[in-house]
Amino acid sequence: MKTVSTMCRFCTNTCPVDAVVKDGRLISVKRKPVPGVTVRRFCPKNAAAPHIVYAPDRITSPLVRNNADRNQNFKKVSWNTVLSDMADRLLFYKNKYGPESVAWLKGTGEDWGPVWQYTQRFMHAFGSPNVIGNGSLCHTTRALPAFITYGTGTRPDTLNAECIIVWGKNDKTSSPPDYNLLMEGIRHGAKLIVIDPVKTDIADSSALWLQIKPGCDGILAMSMMQVIIAENLYDSHFVAEWTTGFDRLTEEVRNYSPEHVASSIWLTPEEIRQAARLYAGSKPACIADGNGLDMNADVTRNVRAVCMLRALCGNLDIKGGDVFPQKVPVRDMSLKDVLNPKVKPVTAGYPLFSSFNKGWGSPVSTVIPDAILDKKPYPIRALIIQASNPLVTAANSLRVAEALKQVEFLVVIDLFMTRTAGQADIFLPATTTFETTQLNMAGLNANSMLLQEKVIEPLGDSRPGWQIIFDLARALKLDEAFPFQTVEEAIDFQLEPSGITVRQMREHPDGLTLQKPEFEKYRQHGFNTPSGKVEFYSETLSDYGYEPIPSFELSRAGRITFDYAKEKYPLAGISGEKSGWFVHSRYRNIPWIVEKEPEPFIDLHPDDAELREIKDNDSVRIISPNGEIFMKVRLSDSVRCGTVRVPWGWGEHDLRFNINSLTDDAERDSVASTPSVRAFMCDVIKRD
């Protein structure tokens, strides 16, 4: 029996863990302590790790369909056969329709950091600009407004804050490490404000909970800034020295007084003023924002306003505030410069969002059905999907299903035969986090660099994602772009500018420190913006044809999907709380996990239930203009009367539970192409 230090990638947190191995078999996984935190919260995914790795329905051999007929069953083939077949098919599309007719969609299951550049390198060497992530639906929609406003993303220092705003986030179920830090900060005396349409456990114990209308976060932030500026509570020294456009911001927020906007966003003027005064009157303070801000059609405006709120109060890059990362210098492996500049990506309609971060590829995944079904801006004919399940996780599942049906050639790389994989021509079996060595984004931290170390050999004939890409490149004779024989060679090549090697990281399994933590780093080189300052008024947004300062239409506050049909569908459906046992649509097939949470429930306010003659545990239909699903009811005052919380991700377990059968993708954020998946008008009807 031995214990190996590595990193777990069973969710997006990528935590340092100790993996126990006996006779080459994974026995258990335990998350390592977080510095400064006295209590470690239980992680369901760590407990489930052996059950996931050795799941009986895990696929460990390449599969193909006979004669590319999707009505036929899959059959097992060798890697040599499947790679040769796949290379021939890709070359066919490249030669007949151009390399841009091939696209690669990559999800979060394989990480989106350094290994993401292997995918980009492959596609760009092949000649296609269409290497696409799912950033339209997650995280990147919050990253862009931060980059536009102050040149980088931030991390909330909840451990040292005097006041913490938890905005659209519930770390108790989604991020045990962050939840530990939050609880430790509260134990140290931090005052807690929670902004969430749903009363979570965190909201229940907060000093102030704002039960906001879904999608209205930007209006709230603008109103808080109106109070802070009018009452002279902002950091005047920081604003004067380190920001531009303050006068224009002051003029704009006059339109968002609490008395004017409160009723539109389901709050009271006093709640808005109390939140503004508590946040601005505490120094340092931080904002821990989450996916609740993503997935709505006003996401760029909303997050921009929240970013400006941080800067207005001078909480950027200070201890206890919102801290800037200290990045490790790495080599750009994307090979983007070899692309034909005349060939535009299918994401070209969203030029700023698809190109603002060179290392992230094009994150506009929502355009893939457009390119397949509408042939806009041109057709995608071959699609490779890696570690993503859009048939369940993307808005308007019926449209996604039709797109997957119509695409001429579909390859899926995954662990299991997901709903999406079931539509494929070729299935390539991937490894789990414990069967591969790689460098993750979370491990690329200047304060503590960590390597995800392989602890067991790949099961059956499965292969790590990096190896699949390298092998496919060789099958396509792209050896010059992929001279690496091992992943260690690739990592060393990527890390060469930092002076760090795989060998050094292995010598420091608990973390290799490249730089000591620093604050107010902008004082040395300014902010990474065109002006070198925080930009309340963004010339960059203006140059791209977008509004330079956020503005909102109160008559459509939140831009909730199907708002036009609210007389027939009177309930605001809220995309539900994430379970601690599952990640997105993943692990719904693991019996050991499903036993812990065997079925989904909607949360319906008792008053809405009484009106519909619905009782606790009744089976109901949830209907929208797009479709219907079936679940049981849990009566709860955690949701406001007039809303219903519908759990997310259960469509993989049973399509009758698929929330995205209710959502739509027609109306989108103009910058990020994000549809309003978080909120939609619907109704609940008792089943006979």
Image (spheres, rainbow, N blue to C red):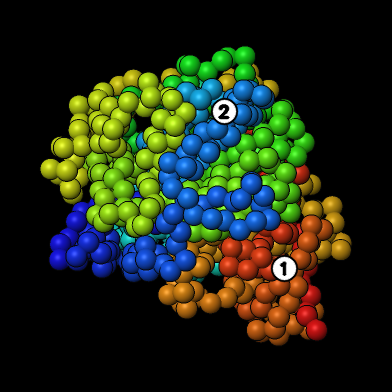
Q: Residues within 10 Å of mark 2 (few under 14, many from 20)?
A: some
Percent x, y of residue 576: 60, 63
At label 2, the amino acid type is Leu
Q: Are the residues at dot 2 and dot 1 in contact (C-beta closer than 8 Å)?
A: no
Which residue is drawn at the image coordinates 54% and 22% (left, top)? 127
At label 1, the amino acid type is Ile
| Left or right: 674 as drawn, with respect to 374 | left
Nearest to N terminus: mark 2 or mark 1: 2
In this view of the protein, can residue 657 be seen by the observer? yes
Percent x, y of residue 339: 52, 18
Q: Is residue 462 above or below residue 179?
A: above
Secondary structure beneath label 1: strand
Which residue is drawn at the image coordinates 60% and 39% (left, top)? 383
Which residue is drawn at the image coordinates 47% and 78% (left, top)? 595
Residue under numbered circle 2: 91
Percent x, y of residue 427: 52, 50
Residue lying at the far left of the rendered structure: 507
Q: Is residue 653 above or below residue 521?
A: below
| Left or right: 145 as drawn, with respect to 516 | right
Residue under numbered circle 1: 629
Which residue is drawn at the image coordinates 26% and 68% (left, top)? 27
In which quadrant of the rendered view does residue 609 lie? bottom right
Secondary structure beneath label 2: helix
| Of the pair 667 and 298, the residue shown nearer to us | 667
Q: Nearer the viewer, mark 2 or mark 1?
A: 2
Percent x, y of residue 363: 55, 36
In which quadrant of the rendered view does residue 460 lie? bottom left
| Of the pair 678 and 415, the residue shown nearer to us | 415
